[in-house]
Image: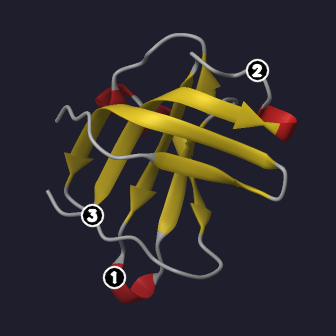
Amino acid sequence: QGGNGGVLRLGQGQTEIVAHPVDVCVVDNTAFVVGEITHSSGDFANAEGFFLLFGFQDNGKDGDFILVPFSFFISPVQIPACDLAPFSFPVPLDRGSYQVKP
């Protein structure tokens, strides 16, 4: 739990968010990450200083998921990563995979 290394990038085309991780929570095969947004463009323009919230679920060969908090994934306040689990829904990955290691 906790963490402050690395860079998170999310986007496609002209729409992009770059964030610095400020909190990480790993439980079993699930990880949640909260990152402070340092750059944003396109549909996410002017989100600098807000927080990016999302998670991953590693299901091995059965297919992985991105976990998105209900109704938002950008927040003006920092929310603890471990608090996101009950409020998130899974979105299957079309290609690629994630590895979650506690």
Residue bearing the label numbered 2: 46
Q: Amino acid at mark 1?
A: Gly
Give how far across and how far down residue 81 sits, in percent.
Answer: 34, 31
Nearest-to-viewer mark from 3 and 2: 2
Q: Are marks 2 and 1 in contact (CB under 8 Å)?
A: no
Q: Is disc 2 placed on a helix, strand or loop?
A: loop
Image quadrant in which you'd find residue 73 = top right
Report the quarter where the N terminus lies.
Answer: top left
| For residue 42, side relative to residue 47 (left or right) | right
Q: Which residue is mark 1?
A: 60
Viewer-nearest residue: 74 or 65: 74
Farthest-out residue, top: 77
Mark 2 or mark 1: which is in front?
2
Q: Quadrant of residue 85?
A: top left
Q: Position of residue 39 (x, y in %)?
A: 63, 32
N-terminal-most mark, 1 or 3? 1
Rounded to the nearest angstrom, the CA distance separating label 2 from label 1 is 37 Å
Other residues around mark 1 within 10 Å, as few (<14) / some (14–19) / many (≥20): few
At 50% across and 42% down in the image, what residue appears? 54
Res 100 quadrant in image: bottom left
Q: Amino acid type of disc 2?
A: Asn
Q: Residue 58: x percent and y percent?
A: 35, 69
Secondary structure category for the residue under label 3:
loop
Label 3 to label 2, Cα distance in Å? 31 Å
- Residue at 78% of width from left, 33% of height from top? 44
